[in-house]
Amino acid sequence: MDYPFANTLAKPDSRLIFKNKLPHIDAAMPEFFRVMAIANQSISQRNMFGNPQGIRHDLGVDTALKLLLVACYQDRLLHGKHSPLAVAEVLRKLVLQWYALGHSLQSCLFFGYYFYALQSQALYVLKDISQQISLLVDPEQALTQDPQVQSLLAPTHSNRWYTSSHGVGDKLFAILIQPQDATRTDLPRPGYHIHFKKSWAFDLRAPLFLPLAEVEEPLIQNNKIITSCPRCAQKCRGTAFDHLEITCPACQQHWKQWT
Ligand SMILES: [Zn+2]
């Protein structure tokens, strides 16, 4: 299977940024990747319904995750007040960049399985680990402002999404989540829970959760579509072809969108 994130290129100097700016994470990541690759073998044995079997807790994933989390605090990527979801998002970006340095795809697939498909379980584990190590952490510690670290952890998706018959798409990044790979959620957190449970094509560039405020439902009527520009919010009109390329008349922003 092709995984859409698999062609992710390493950022310039990311090897050195890990080594020099995130030394604790650099030391913890190899073990995290090692145990995730083994765990992925255990889940790729499918049950009689063709679904992956559960996670075996004797494989050391939770222990390696705990050490990585401690490393994230030591390297000042996290402080004690981050929500489990925010912690998971930092881990997701780190894993993607570590993979881009030539590390195992299998490890990423396990990360995807655990953090997207089993999201509530993974977030619970993160919350639990955070509590266990909270005594080691200054809840108010200042986060690193290092520009190289910021660029390493730059967003892998935008906050300008749209709905379509092909799924939920990102207007500014080439990410499309198939309809049955995300579930619309209601209060207390309206949005889309992204789980990839239909295709299992985990895309580590996609957020774990998409707030509803970041997703536009374009207006389609009489074969015309009205959708807003992701940069300046200008309403743009066009013929509702299956796949559109739009240029905003106000700011010239160009983007592609499915209907
Ligand atoms: Zn515009």
Image (tube, grey):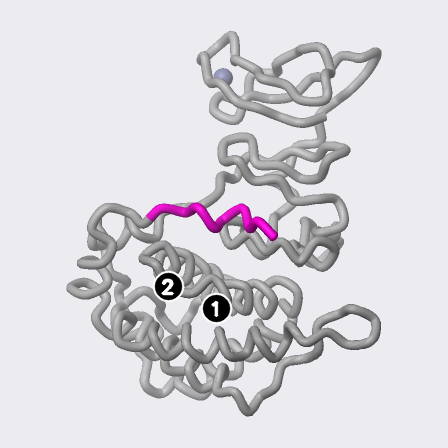
Residue at image x 67%, y 56%? 196
Determine which of the numbered discs, if any, sits on residue 143 in the image.
none
For mark 1, does the 10 Å Cα neighbourhood hold few (<14), some (14 to 19), or many (20 or more) residues?
Answer: many
Determine which of the numbered discs, if any, sits on residue 107 in the image.
1
Q: Please provide percent x and percent y for residue 153.
A: 34, 53
Q: Please state if 126 lies on the left or on the right of 18 as rendered.
A: right
The secondary element bearing badge 2 is classed as: loop
Comparing 43 with 171, the one in front is 43
Residue at image x 49%, y 21%? 232
Q: Please state if 8 lies on the left or on the right of 234 as rendered.
A: left
Which image quadrant: the C terminus? top right
Q: Is residue 8 magenta?
A: yes
Q: Please provide percent x and percent y for residue 158.
A: 49, 39
Q: Quadrant of residue 202?
A: bottom right
- Tell me if label 2 and label 1 are in contact, CB under 8 Å: yes
Comparing 21 with 56, the one in front is 56
Residue at image x 41%, y 73%? 33
Gap between marks 2 and 1, in whole Å? 8 Å
- Residue type (three-letter) at the residue carrying disc 1: Ser
For mark 2, does the 10 Å Cα neighbourhood hold few (<14), some (14 to 19), or many (20 or more) residues?
Answer: some
Q: Please state if 217 lies on the left or on the right of 28 as rendered.
A: right
Determine which of the numbered discs, if any, sits on residue 103 in the image.
2
The magenta segment is 1-9
Q: Please provide percent x and percent y for residue 82.
A: 44, 67
Q: Quadrant of residue 220?
A: top right
